[in-house]
């Protein structure tokens, strides 16, 4: 799959380093949460999260290194260890 035209294709990776999709019940409602991360060839981590209880409900974040990303995961109980 071609992602688009870019001068530096090394910025793209299709190998997820972590992907967690979890269905949870909160206040009688079934909700879906998603946490997916990819390590780019330059070492940065691109993170996508979706949680309907957050505002905004979805976001992309960029982390400088795997250690910084792992610190975040250790703080997220529903992601840690998955």
Image (tube, rainbow, N blue to C red):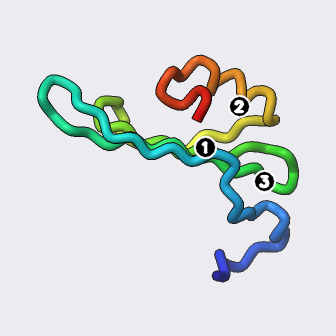
Relative to residue 81, is residue 17 drawn left or right? right
Q: Residues within 10 Å of mark 2 (few under 14, many from 20)?
A: some
Of mark 3 and mark 1, the one earlier in the sequence is 3
Q: Which residue lies furthest to the top in this view?
A: 75
User: How far from the left and from the top, in percent, is residue 57?
Assistant: 35, 39
Mark 1, other Cα within 10 Å: few <14 / some 14–19 / many ≥20 = many
- Whichever of labels 2 and 1 marks the residue nearer the N terminus, that label is 1
- Disc 3 to disc 1, C-alpha distance: 11 Å
**In this figure, which residue is indicated by the disc labeled 1?**
47
On the question of residue 34 being in view, the answer is yes
For mark 1, give the secondary structure: strand
Q: Is residue 59 visible?
A: no
Q: Is mark 3 on a helix, strand or loop?
A: loop
Q: Residue under circle 2?
A: 69
Q: Give x and y (percent) for residue 12.
A: 74, 64
First-in-chain label (3 vs 2): 3
Quadrant position of residue 44: top right
Are dots 2 and 1 in contact, CB under 8 Å? Answer: yes
Is 37 left or right of 79, judged from the image as shown? right
The answer to the question of whether label 3 and label 2 lie on touching residues, with beta carbons closer than 8 A, is no
Label 3 neighbourhood size at 10 Å, few (<14), some (14-19), many (20+)?
some
């Amino acid at each position: 799959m071609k992602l688009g035209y870019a001068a530096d294709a090394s910025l793209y990776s299709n190998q997820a380093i972590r992907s967690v999709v979890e269905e949870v019940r909160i206040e009688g409602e079934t909700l879906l949460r998603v946490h997916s991360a990819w390590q780019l060839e330059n070492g940065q981590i691109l993170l996508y999260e979706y949680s309907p209880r957050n505002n905004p409900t979805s976001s992309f974040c960029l982390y400088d290194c795997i250690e910084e990303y792992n610190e975040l995961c250790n703080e997220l109980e529903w992601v840690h260890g998955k």
